Amino acid sequence: MAKQDFYDILGISKSATQAEIKKAYRKMAIKYHPDKNPDDKTAEENFKKAAEAYEVLSDENKKARYDQYGHAAFDGPQGGGGFGGGGMNMDDIFSQFGDIFGGGGFGGGFGGGFGGGQRQARVKGTNMRIRVKLTLEEIAKGVEKKVKVRRKVQADGVRYKTCSTCNGSGQQMRVTNTILGRMQTATTCSTCSGAGEMISSKPNGADAQGLVVKEETVPINIPAGVTEGVQLKVGGKGNDAPGKNSVSGDLLVLIEEIPHENLKREGTNIHYDLYVNFSEAVLGVSKEVETVTGKVKIKIDAGTQSGKILRLKGKGLPSIERYGTGDFLIHINVWTPQELTKEQRQFFDKMQGDVNFVPSPNKSDKSFFEKVKDMFS
């Protein structure tokens, strides 16, 4: 089932400013908040959709990738978040409210209206970044890469106790007097950094947060059609954070394309220079060409001119947006011999005045500039 457009979810246009995006999300969050709509599954689903849309559109980098590739920029076979923001849980969503409602969730101004009560923020570990290099053949078909990463994980045997500063809430409440009355705001606990827990004991070798470095092999499913510079996300494979209720960071994968020796990529199209000798161009010939998806046999007609382009439909690269597959463009180059034997030179001397050797292009023969124009149109 196709995902709903993030701009439609928030009811804004693609030209909306960050202030307008934040305002639209704030409105949706108030309207569909679970405390205001108890046991309403539809409201809860709308609440999550709005949070997912805001997570992407409020981040300039994610927004740029979404504007270019749509949901395909984040979708992946990992599930539960995979390469995108889908699968956000309620704790992740509530962690956004510090930004939307001025720090500290719903606090005084909104807490009463939505049932009050403090929600403990789940601490998230730091993200990790790696680069993965792909060949054109791997990009054409999609590939699973298994990479070794050294990530911080919670040590076996580490034990926690409730934070004495925030009593396990992960937040510290502050009340200030203003001309409008007493205002209550919540900030992240300075002692436990929002985890609500403190380490009571840890094994040898663990750092101050109860974490150890562990090497792990992570499978990364890379969809077909990715481009240089695309960043994929493997959820939960970054560093752990301290605390029993914490969540792991993400593994961010930056795609690099290995230049091909013979092929040149242009979007979803592939260009290939095929050289044929003078005799082959005159008499015609069959050639076997290696594409990104395998070998194909092509026929070069007798009398083929240098510069002719043969287009193999659908033999290029798939679109990451699933808009079809590009073409494989073969550029014919007739190789003119640079050294001749005495007999060969005598033959061509005789042919100089022959009518069949006199250039006579007709209107259907396009010029070089026309071919370039057609190639990019």
Image (spheres, helix red, strand yellow):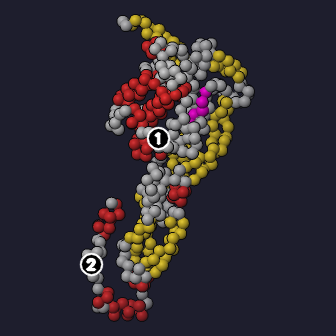
Give the spatial CA distance, label 2 vs label 1: 52 Å
Instruction: Give the answer, above or below, for where 322 lies relative to 358.
Output: above
Is 355 left, or right, of 149 in this rendering? left
Residue 172 coordinates in the image, percent (x, y)? 53, 14
Picture residue at 60% right of the left edge, 50% below the top: 145
Picture residue at 37% right of the left edge, 7% below the top: 180
Picture residue at 42% right of the left edge, 85% below the top: 283
State yes or no: residue 184 in magenta.
no
Q: Which residue is mark 1?
A: 3
Q: Which residues are magenta?
A: 246-250
Q: Dot 2: few (<14), some (14–19), or many (≥20) neighbours within 10 Å?
A: few
Instruction: Give the answer, above or below, for where 122 lies relative to 323.
Output: above
Q: Which residue is mark 2?
A: 362
Q: Is residue 238 visible?
A: no
Instruction: Tell me the SS state at disc 2.
Output: loop
Q: Dot 1: few (<14), some (14–19), or many (≥20) neighbours within 10 Å?
A: few
Picture residue at 66% right of the left edge, 41% below the top: 216
- Quadrant for residue 301, please give it: bottom left
Instruction: Tell me the SS state at disc 1.
Output: loop
The single residue placed furthest to the left in the displayed view is 363
